[in-house]
Amino acid sequence: MMEQRGINTLLVHGRRRSKIEMMLDLLWACDTPVPLTKTKIYYRSNLNFQTLKELSSRLIERGLLTKRLLGKNTTVFKTTEKGRTLLSSYYNILDELGEKKYC
C-alpha cells in the first residue's frame, strides 16, 4: 500500500483539481489492503458519484483499477500493481520538482 500522500483536496494551489489529479486521487483512495466500496471511495477521494463512475471506468479500461462483485449487490474496487506504479512515479516526479500537492 502506498503511504498516505494522496492529493485528496478540492483545490490544489487555489484551483480545482484536473481530471488527472482526480484520477490519481481515485487510485490513491483504492490503494488499501482491503478492496473498497464506492461509498468509502467517495469519502476518501472527495469525488461525487458521477465523476467516480466515469473515472473508475477509464482506470479499469487501462488496467489501473480492478472492480469485482461481492455477493449480489456489493461492488468493490482496488488499485492494481500497474496503478501503484503510476502513483509511485507521480510522487517521485513531485518530489523531484519540490512540489507538495499531497497530504
Image (cartoon, rainbow, N blue to C red):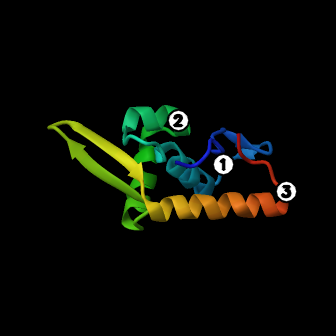
Furthest-right residue in view? 98
Q: Residue at 52% of width from left, 58% of height from top?
A: 84
Task: Name the residue rendered at 46%, 45% in the picture.
Answer: 30
The residue lying furthest to the bottom in this view is 62
> Looking at the image, do the residues carrying marks 3 and 2 touch, with CB atoms under 8 Å apart?
no
Residue 58's quadrant in the figure? bottom left
Determine the secondary structure under disc 1: loop
56 left or right of 73 in image: right
Q: Which of marks 3 and 1 is nearer the N terminus?
A: 1
**Where does residue 35 sit, x and y in percent of width and height?**
37, 42
Secondary-structure class at tag 2: helix
Along the horizontal axis of the image, is 81 left or right of 7?
A: left
Q: Which residue is drawn at 46% across and 54% down?
A: 55
What residue lies at 73% left-to-right and 64% top-to-bottom? 93
Mark 3: few/some/many CA within 10 Å (<14, 14-19, 20+): few
First in sequence: mark 3 vs mark 2: 2
In the displayed structure image, the side of residue 85 where residue 63 appears, left or right: left
Tell me which corner region of the image, top left, top right, bottom left or bottom right, holds residue 59: bottom left
Q: Mark 2 = which residue?
A: 44
Cα separation, mark 3 vs mark 2, equals 25 Å
Percent of width and height locating residue 21: 62, 53
On residue 98, which mark appears? 3
Q: Distance between the residues labelled 3 and 1?
A: 19 Å
C-alpha span from label 2 to label 1:
15 Å
Q: In this view, does 84 lie above or below 7?
A: below
Q: Residue 17 carries which label?
A: 1
Query: Which of the two discs, 3 and 2, sits closer to the camera?
Result: 3
Residue 70, given in percent of the width and then of the height, sits at: 21, 41
Residue 75 is labelled as none
Estimate how packed mark 1 is, as few (under 14), some (14 to 19) or many (20 or more) residues with alpha carbons within 10 Å.
some
